[in-house]
Amino acid sequence: MRRTLPLLLPILLCACAHLPTSERSPISITVSPDHVELTRDDNRHPFQLDITIRVDVAGGISFVPETVVLGVVGEDHSKVIYSFDPDVRFTAQKPFVKETTRYARESAMWHVTLKGREEGGPPHVVVHKFQVHNTQLKEALAKCDACNGEWGVHGMLRWEGCICRTEDVGERCLDGRDCRGRCMFKRYELVQAGQEPRCDKDGKCSARLAIRRAVGQCSEFEFVYGCHSFVRDGASDNPPGVGQWRASRICVD
């Protein structure tokens, strides 16, 4: 027995030193749902990542967070999504739970990185990696080709998606409902000419105002970005107007 005891001690120390990091770390990050799938509202809007990030702290520990970073593993444009005031603390009783949304396109491995320190301790970094899937991208690109669309980054928000071309591009329209896309205002068309005031011998005078209606052309794309003048939906439900008119401009991004 005197010879075997000294040999057991190193073995026990070695086993403790190689415990998995997840078992030793007092800070853990989880992402839900378990299967993260990119989704989008429609063909024009970009794919987006919708997740809930949760940080749990072991009992008896007060963690002082600095930042939470979210991004694709191996890429440089990871983003700080949360920065914390110096007086914020994560504890077992007060875990960090937040929902977040990011725009993305490809399936990829993502990471959530928490930087901070245990109160009174050295800097501490916790990294959680998770797989993001996009099973709809191939179908979305095929739909864009089918509508002779333009896939790319559009508008001031720089959304990546598809805008479909229309089959009635360039056709004359008097109402926004006449077009597959938008009725782009071109001019006011004279419906009835005006007449200068005329007075009879009794001094009774009459005049006639010019009557005009808005005329446009159907747009090339179903959705039109930027600032333009449109013939509104329902314009033909009302009688043509009188006098001089100026088409209003609407900005859509």
Image: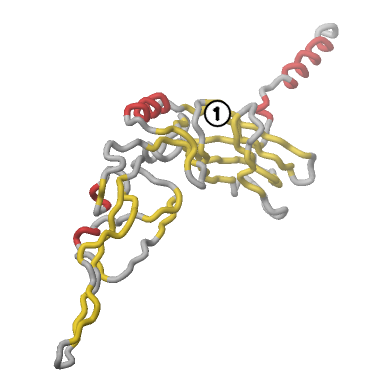
Front in this rendered view, residue 96 or 105: 105
Disc 1, SS: strand
In the depicted structure, whether residue 52 falls above or below residue 187: above
Q: Residue at x 56, y 41 (%)?
A: 54
Residue 15 placement, left or right of 106: right
Residue type indicated by callout 1: Phe
Residue 183 placement, left or right of 86: left
Does residue 49 show up? no
Q: Residue at x 55, y 45 (%)?
A: 97
The x, y position of residue 56, in whole percent, is 60, 40
The x, y position of residue 186, in whole percent, is 34, 53
In the depicted structure, whether residue 93 falls above or below residue 192: above
Q: Residue at x 30, y 40 (%)?
A: 169
Front in this rendered view, residue 15 or 116: 116
> Mark 1 — residue?
130
Neighbour tally class for label 1: few under 14, some 14-19, many 20 plus, Cα within 10 Å: some
Front in this rendered view, residue 180 or 160: 180
